[in-house]
Image (tube, grey):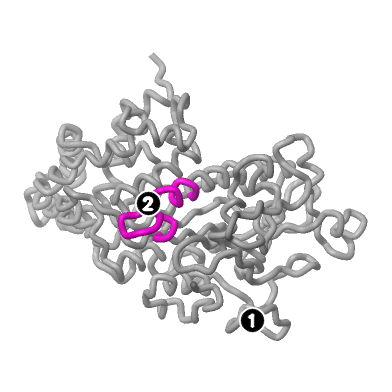
Amino acid sequence: MKKTRQDDTCIPERRNFLKAGAGFMGSLLLGGIPFRAVAQATNLAPADRCFVFVYFSGGWDQLLAFDPRDPTVFTDDRVSETRIVTGYNQLAAEARFQQTPLIPKERAGAGKPTMTFGPAIGDARAPNLSDHYDLMTLVRGINMSTLTHEVGYRYFLTGKMPIGSAARGSSTATEIVGQMKPTVPIPSIAQNVESYNDRYGGYANALRVSGLADLVLTLDPPSAARQLDSEIEKQLIDLNGMPITCEEQALTARGVGTTYENSREQMQSVMANKLSDSFRFQLTANDQVRTTYGLNGQAYPYNSANGRAAMVATALKKGISQCVSINLAGGLDTHFGTQLTQAGNQRAGFDALNLLVTDLRATAHPGGGNFMDHTTILVFSEFARTPTINATGGRDHHLSNSCLLMGAGIKHNLVVGRSGDIGMSPGTVDLRTGANDPNGSNIFPEHIIATVLASAKLDYSITRVDPLRFILA
C-alpha cells in the first residue's frame, strides 16, 4: 500500500527514524546537550528570559513587509526617477491583500503607531501581526554587504561576515545559551535553521531537527529509545566493522561509541519524561494548542507555519527550551512570477508569527507579567528584493534589508534606520542616537546581534561593535 505523508509521520521509514535520531544524538552525544539537564527536568519551569529567532528563507520583498512605500507617491510614471515599483496593484486579484500600506490599529494605552507595514503583513479587516506594534522596533536600511543567499543567511545568524560562504563564530542562540547556561532540558532548538558553536562546551549546542515530526521522534519515551539504541549500534558497527565497545575504534567517530555507552541510562531517563507528548498536537491534552493555532482538521499539521509556531510556544511555555530558531516561511527567492507568490508566502509566515505573539502575550509567566515580557524575538531574512521588477515579473537580490525586534529588552513602537527614496539603498544614521544622518554610518547585522545580546545584559564583544543603544529598553 502506498504511504501517505501522514503515514510517514506516524510510522516513519527506517532512514527517517535514523535521521531524526542523528539530529538528537548529534547534539547529545557529540559533546552536545548535557543529559543531566534533561534528567533533572522532572519539574519543568520556563526560562526567565527566552529568545526566538524567526527566519524567512529566500530573501524577502520589504516593500510588502517592513519597508513599504505609498503607491500614490511612488507611481509607475516616476520609476525612472525613483527606481521603485511598489507592485501593490498586482495584488488586486486577491481580496485579502490591500493595495496600500497597512496602518496598525491603535491599541488602548499604547500610543499612536509610528510605523506602517506592507500588504503581506496582514489584512486590516482581521487580526494580524501589526496589532502588536506596541511590542516592536522596526530596523530599516540594514546593509547586508552581500547578495549571496548563504552568506547573508549566516551573517545574520552569527553577526559575523562569513569567510567565503563558511559561517564564522557561533550562532546567536548558541552565544546566549553559552553565557546564560539555562537549566531547561533542551536549551536551544533549531528547526530547519543552521547552528554553530565555536567556543562553548556541548551544553550550548542546539538540537537541530528538520521539522516537528523529527522532534517528536527524538524525544519519544524508552520503548522507542530502545529501538533507536539498536539502530545506532548497528550503524556504528557497520561503520567501524567492530563492536562499539572497542574504544580505539569508537574514537574514529569523535568518541561517539564510548560516549553513547556511558550515556545510555541517562538517555532513558531523559526520554522517560515523555517530552514528546507536548509536541503531539493530536492528543486530547493538546486540544487548546490545536484551537489556538488553527490546527484542527489538519491531517498533517507538522509542516504548516502554524504548526511550527505552535512548536515554539510549546517549547517556551512548558519550560523545555530557552532559545528556538525556526524557519517560518520559504519560497521567497522570486526572480520570476508575480507579487502574489511573494506576498502569499510571506503572509503564511506573518500570520503564524501573529498567532505565536498573541499566545505568548496572553499567557502568564511564572516570573510575572506575560511571556512576551520575558521573550525577545528577532525576525530576519538574508537580504531583500530589488525595488524594481525585472523582465520576468519578479525581483532580484538587493543589499538593503530590514528586520523586526519584539518583546523583552527592546523599546516598543519604534522605527529606526531608513532606505533611500531612490533605489532603496541603505541609509545612514547616527549610531549613538539613531537619528538619520547623511554623515552617519550604515546599520549592519552585527549591530542587530549586539543589540539582541545587550538586551539581556550579555557580553556582546564578539560582534566588535556597540549595540544600538537607542533601541534598548
For the question of whether residue 317 can be seen, the reply is: yes
* Depicted 85 relative to depicted 211: above or below: below
The tag on residue 364 is 2
Q: Is there any visible trace of residue 148 in the rendered image?
A: no
Q: Give the side of residue 80 with respect to residue 427, left or right.
A: right
Residue at the image point whose x is 64% and y is 81% from the top: 441
Q: Amino acid at mark 1?
A: Ser
The mark that comes first in sequence, 1 or 2, is 2
Residue 85: mark: none
Q: Residue furthest bottom?
A: 439
In the rendered structure, does residue 305 fall within the stretch colored magenta? Answer: no
Instruction: Give the spatial CA distance, label 1 vs label 2.
Output: 40 Å
Q: Which of 141/13 is in front? A: 141
Residue 327 on image: x %, y %: 48, 49
**In the orientation shown, which residue stands out farthest toward the right?**
77
Please tell me which residue lies in front, 349 or 395.
349
Q: Residue at x 68, y 44 (%)?
A: 124
Q: Which range of residues does the magenta coloring cover?
A: 357-374
> What secondary structure is marked by label 2?
loop
From the image, tell me which residue sits under label 1. Answer: 441
- Quadrant hosting residue 139: bottom right
- Callout 1 secondary element: loop
Q: Are marks 1 and 2 in contact (CB under 8 Å)?
A: no
Image mark count: 2
Q: Position of residue 264 (x, y in %)?
A: 11, 46
x, y percentage for residue 112?
66, 61
* Vertical side of 399 occupied by 294: above or below: above
Q: In percent of the image, x 76 and y 41: which residue is there?
A: 91
